Amino acid sequence: MAKPTAKPKMDSKTYAKELRALQTELCYLQDWVKQTGERIIVVFEGRDAAGKGGTIRALTERVSPRVFRLVALPAPTDREKTQMYIQRYMNHFPAAGEIVIFDRSWYNRAGVEHVMGFCTKEQHKKFLELCPVVERYMVDGGIRLIKYWLEVSNEEQARRFEARIDDPMRQWKLSPMDLPSRERWYDYSRARDAMLDATDTAHAPWNIIRSDDKKRARLNCIAHFLKQIPYKQVKRPKVKLPKRATKHAYDDETPMAKRRWVPERY
């Protein structure tokens, strides 16, 4: 695909307006998922510093964590390493009325595990063979599976890593895998290509998002996600705020006056 002409950075006011409209639709989607008992999995993968965390936050910050459940698993334990590879992920699959978002997923085996030598070549090959079969089973079992790959350019990834190194509030984002991933850019590119070739299927296609502009990437992702699901706005009963009852009334501020209050510094 030809590289598109670069658009100017989206201003914050426009971004906030568009994001609010999309997040309102996400709330409508949430009601529909609860009512219909839908089960949805959303997988987020991509290069390091591609903006997965910010995109997931934009997707989830206005909805209930009981419906939109985020799963970001740490490195497997010694026990989990002896299990069937996808087993620890299946433990988090959605029940009726849930949307589970995987911030990285079973596709670790196609990416970081393969590139960094955490799995054997045979394990990597077997994963690419079996993954489409397992995902076919998931979809046939009634799960909506939506997969996103965030693609950031070489120049923008370098800029974001430099910002993490220099900013104390971003240094925590630098993981032990980040710097090797920068050095092994082309190894990760080849791993990505092999993964897409093997697992970009009709029943579980990959959706690629350009993420050099974080604001546009977030909006594009949410808008696309909403279009994948045939939700309808659920009619909610009208809510009327009740008046405060005066029975058993007392001066409830008096006992609070002697409590330990946080100083109002600001």
Image: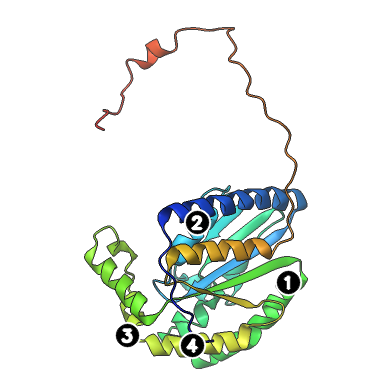
Q: Please name the amino acid that badge 4 sits on.
A: Ala
| Residue tagged 1 | 139
Q: Is residue 242 visible?
A: yes
Of labels 2 and 4, earlier in sequence is 2
Front residue (pair 32, 123) = 32
Earlier residue among tags 3 and 2 = 2
Say which residue label 4 marks: 191
Instruction: Kindly check if marks 2 and 4 are in contact, taking CB atoms under 8 A apart as contact.
Output: no
Element type where label 1 sits in the image: helix
Task: Find disc 2 in the rendering and name its residue.
Answer: 58
- Residue at 44 percent across and 8 percent down: it is 251
Alpha carbon separation for disc pair 1 and 4: 25 Å
Query: Viewer-nearest of labels 2 and 1?
Result: 2
Three-letter code, disc 3? Glu
In the rendered image of this protein, does residue 264 appear above or below residue 253? below
Q: Position of residue 265 (x, y in %)?
A: 24, 31
Q: Which mark is residue 183?
A: 3
